[in-house]
Image (cartoon, coloured by chain):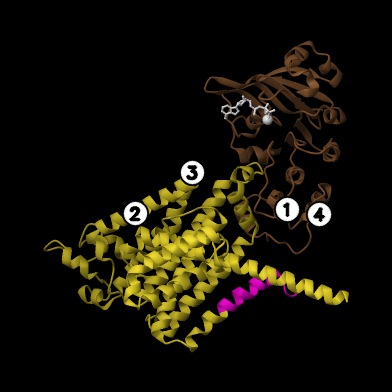
Chain colours: A yellow, B brown
Amino acid sequence: MQLLTRSNLQLAAYGLFIVVVMLLPLVMDVFWLNRISKYLVFGMLAIAISMSWGYAGILNLGQGLFFGFGAYMLAMSLKLASPTSLQQGSADEPVPDFMLWTSEPGAPIDLCCINQGSFLWIPFKEQWFGVAMGLVMPMLIAFVLGYAMFRARIAGVYVAILTLALCLLVRLLVIDAQPLINGFNGLTDLGWFTVGGLEFDPYLVETYYLIAIITCLVLIGARWLVNTKVGVVLQAIRDNEERVRYLGYDVAIYKVFFFCVSAAIAGLAGMLYVIAAEFASPTFMNIGFSISMVVWAAVGGRWSLLGACLGAILLNVVEATVSETETFVEAWQLIIGAIFLFVVLVMPRGLAGFFQDAADLALERLHRAVKERRAR
Amino acid sequence: MSTILEIESLEVNFRGFRAVDGFDMAVEEGELRVLIGANGAGKTTLMDLITGRTKSTGGKVTFLGDNITNRQEHKIARRGIGRKFQVPSVFKDLTVRENFEVAHTRSLSVWRNLAVSAKPRQLNTQIERAMQLTSLTDESTTLAGSLSHGQSQWLELGMVLMQNPKLVLLDEPTAGMTALETEKTSEIINGLRGEHSIIVVEHDMTFVRSICEVITVMHLGKKLAEGTVEQIENDRAVIDAYLGSGGITHA
Ligand SMILES: Nc1ncnc2c1ncn2[C@@H]1O[C@H](COP(=O)(O)OP(=O)(O)OP(=O)(O)O)[C@@H](O)[C@H]1O
Ligand SMILES: [Mg+2]
């Protein structure tokens, strides 16, 4: 049995990543841990992109839509749990502050009827309802959108355009919905996510672990998924969609499935981001953000889940360090653009591809050397 | 013997151009039928119509007693019709083994396949057998994109077998093959006789003679003649239709 094989090296890389993520609190203070936890969330987004783009060939330029939905769903619950909201209503009947500012004079201070849509907030008093919606809503939207697109055999660049357009449309609707979700300003002044009495203050090590563990689980889960037969069929679809149909697979259903899983991961990432950053805002649905996700995945290597995840983390760490130097801030967009171009043109498989090639080469040399020694 | 596939006055109209024009054909269970015809006669289009790739504008296709005309491609495939394309059509970014894995369609549903590992521990005897049959055992970890032309033809042939369809449609399986490769291919196809019903489009008359029972000749989207090799070679209409191209052997 060979110990040093390609798949064992890959496993080792996953293991190393998880160990490092788990041990970071030993060497970092809570401020950096909070930063890193946001980057881990971005890593999750890149994993979602790698799954849909790298494995299934679905380039989603509107992933921010799913991220934003996840974020808003949890943020609504946390908003109701904030001290301000509780003061304005009562412990049983919290009311968000911005609803008061915009309410008609004489309107009752109650979620039922302070404004037209406010009743929608009522079930969000239960935090777990928000969490459930943060997963269900992105999946539901992905299902409807995916089903419509993939049944009609819309593919390639049209998927990118449609997803991007939908994301922008929803962003406009959110900005417009001032009375309902505070429009342009987003949801701020949130309470803490609470599980069994433990409040997840973003500057607690526990919060870092919550996010880190979920990220690792998502990474492992995604890796398992692409290694099932469903994953291989999807790669076949990416390769030659038409051929797969004549083998009897319902191609649209396979794509919808992966699209939904990818949306669920993005929704989960949105929720975790709210916990770490304590706000939700329409900027989550900016085009720039959705495109950044694709850039992270491309730089890290879209055909490698771990590569995409690391790409997101590395680029964000670099950005954070660079932006501490005033002159570089402006140039950052330019640098990122250049890196992206370089990767796309010179190493289409990203950093992960580069390391894989290097490892393959090293393994080959090693095996040859061993053989030669044996022969002697 | 009972009829497995029945085509009745099938027609497709591409903006005024009838590539298949009132075509009739019946194939018996276990039969090996050869379809010949000059370039552009409509052979590939006929296969497109049977497999749902192109929607017909008239006529009817009946498979195992069910009307399958213009059904969705995957539904027709699930009924038991497999197809090898004229241009070898395999998954280039996947390994040979993975190609077979995808073609191994015991279960087609997403949920069931979630429980199936892509890299099963125990060897899959069916896949091993298909790789042996197509001489691809040594290439199991090669990317399909870097196979030779003949090898990709075999890979696709093997994939169709993996699928284990009741009716196999083969569109020029020996195109671009050396004489040796062609011989091996006709061996493979002969081996399938009886187990599957087969329709094969072929130009190579040596190959046709080596495998054939009944030939159907297609011309300008219509059936021109049908019969044994001798009958076809002496058929007036066929000879007339092929006069310009120097006889049937060079069709
Ligand atoms: N989608 C389409 N739209 C318009 N015309 C088409 C279409 N598909 C095929 N045709 C035409 O139909 C005719 C029959 O083509 P087909 O590919 O079926 O011929 P063939 O018998 O397979 O020929 P070959 O021996 O060259 O493979 C050709 O003239 C082709 O140009
Ligand atoms: Mg053809």
Reading the chain from its start, which is encountered first: label 3 or label 2? 3
Q: Which residue is mark 1?
A: B96
Q: Which residue is mark 3?
A: A154
Q: Position of residue A73 (x, y in %)?
A: 36, 65
Callout 1: helix, strand or loop?
Answer: helix
Q: Are marks 3 and 1 on the same chain?
A: no
| Residue at 61% over, 77% down | A15
Q: Quadrant of residue A358?
A: bottom right
**Where is ligand 2, by quadrant?**
top right
Callout 3: helix, strand or loop?
Answer: loop
Instruction: Please check the rendered image and state whether residue B232 is part of the magenta-colored stretch, yes or no.
Output: no
Crowding around mark 3 (Cα neighbors within 10 Å: few <14, some 14 to 19, many 20+) is few
Q: Nearer the viewer, residue A113 or B208?
A: B208
Q: Which residue is mark 4?
A: B137
Q: Are marks 4 and 1 on the same chain?
A: yes
Numbered range of the magenta stretch: A2-18
Q: Is residue A2 above or below residue A260?
A: below
Q: Are marks 3 and 4 on the same chain?
A: no
Instruction: Please check the rendered image and state whether residue A4 is part of the magenta-colored stretch, yes or no.
Output: yes
> Whole-Å distance between the Cαs marked 2 and 1?
42 Å
| Residue at 66% over, 73% down | A9
Q: Determine whether, in the image, residue A343 is placed left or right of residue A333.
A: right
Q: Is residue B39 above or below residue A122?
A: above
Callout 4: helix, strand or loop?
Answer: helix
Q: Determine whether, in the image, residue A142 is placed left or right of residue B158.
A: left
Q: Position of residue A266 (x, y in %)?
A: 45, 63
